[in-house]
Amino acid sequence: MQERKAFKINGYVGILVSLVLLAVAGFLIYTNANDLVGTDLILPVILIIVAALILSGITIVQPNEAKVLTFFGTYLGVIREQGLWISIPLTLKASVSLRVINFNSEKLKVNDLEGNPIEIAAVVVYKVADSAKAVFDVEDYEEFVQIQSETGIRHIASQYAYDHFEKDTEMSLRKNSDEIADYLAQDLQNRLNVAGVDVIEARIMHLAYSSEIASAMLQRQQAQAVLSARKVIVDGAVGLVKSAIEQLSEEDVVELDEDKKAQMVNNLMVAIVSEKGTQPVINTGSIH
């Protein structure tokens, strides 16, 4: 079902015409009140019926709202323009909000790509783009959005790991939140096209390990952080020691054989890498 424009005219004009018809009918009945016969009622009754039919087509469209019109089970079209309108008489008019809607999903428990149980929730921002699809192609488009959003969140969560400790180049739910949000929005848009809904944004708002493994994973993250920090310190220390030895050799400050270089490297590495402050030992005798 595709959205199309319904026939309509200005509602104020229709109301004015109806009032005129009712006034004429009343005038005819009043002028013939004394010698009124059956045939004299035909025209006033017709005028009253026509006025009632015109008034039955009145509809008020609020800003950011659409009216979907059906006539005895036949889809006629949609009125999107705000204001007072008169359309085809005796039509049923279903209101559909065109405002932007926020949907906050429940916290879902799902297994990530590596099989770790995680808790995930997302916020989905959407609006109705095709009101005819929203009314006729799904039972309840708001409930449809909620169910399909949770399905899409579960699907995306199972396609990626919560975090990669060894493979930094691969995408993860924690490190690549912007990319994951884009993939989630695309997945939801494919699911919600049938309901005539446009997904404006979809973003993960809660992400955590499940309680049964949260403590173990926190220790793993802390250990990984410590190892990464120590690696940076060691790499920097190696560069400093190399630079110091090369500078001493180039400027002929002191002549070092291989044993002394090894001892110097050992002392400098201990002094730089050690987490505690080192105490210098001053040699007052021969350096040999």
Image (cartoon, rainbow, N blue to C red):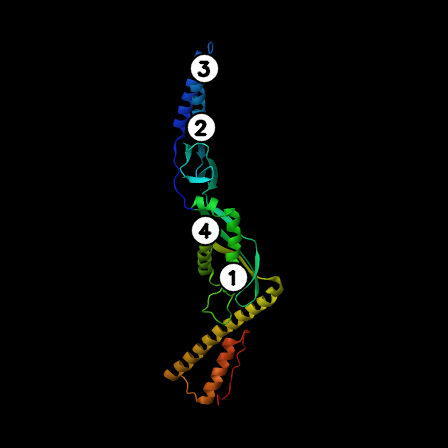
Asked whether 208 or 76 is in front, the reply is 76
> Which numbered mark, 2 or 4, is in the foreground of this view?
2
**Secondary element type, mark 4:** helix
Q: CA distance from mark 3 to mark 2?
A: 20 Å
Q: Which residue is mark 3?
A: 29
Residue 104 rendering spot, x and y as whole percentages: 53, 51
Q: Which of the labelled discs sits on residue 194, or is there none?
A: 4
Q: CA distance from mark 1 to mark 3?
A: 74 Å
Residue 183 rendering spot, x and y as whole percentages: 45, 59
- The image shows residue 260, relative to residue 189, as above or below, that is below
Three-letter amino acid code at disc 3?
Answer: Ile
Asked whether 100 or 244 is in front, the reply is 100
**Secondary element type, mark 2:** helix
Q: Which of the labelled discs sits on residue 157, or is there none?
A: 1
> Which numbered mark, 1 or 3, is in the foreground of this view?
3
The answer to whether marks 4 and 1 mark residues whose Cβ atoms lie closer than 8 Å is: no
- The image shows residue 164, relative to residue 145, as above or below, that is below
Q: Earlier in the sequence, mark 1 or mark 2?
A: 2
Q: Residues within 10 Å of mark 1 (few under 14, many from 20)?
A: many
Q: Earlier in the sequence, mark 4 or mark 1?
A: 1
Q: CA distance from mark 2 to mark 4?
A: 35 Å
Q: Which of the labelled discs sits on residue 53, or is there none?
A: 2
Q: Earlier in the sequence, mark 3 or mark 2?
A: 3
Residue 172 rendering spot, x and y as whole percentages: 49, 65
Q: CA distance from mark 1 to mark 2?
A: 55 Å
The answer to whether marks 3 and 2 mark residues whose Cβ atoms lie closer than 8 Å is: no
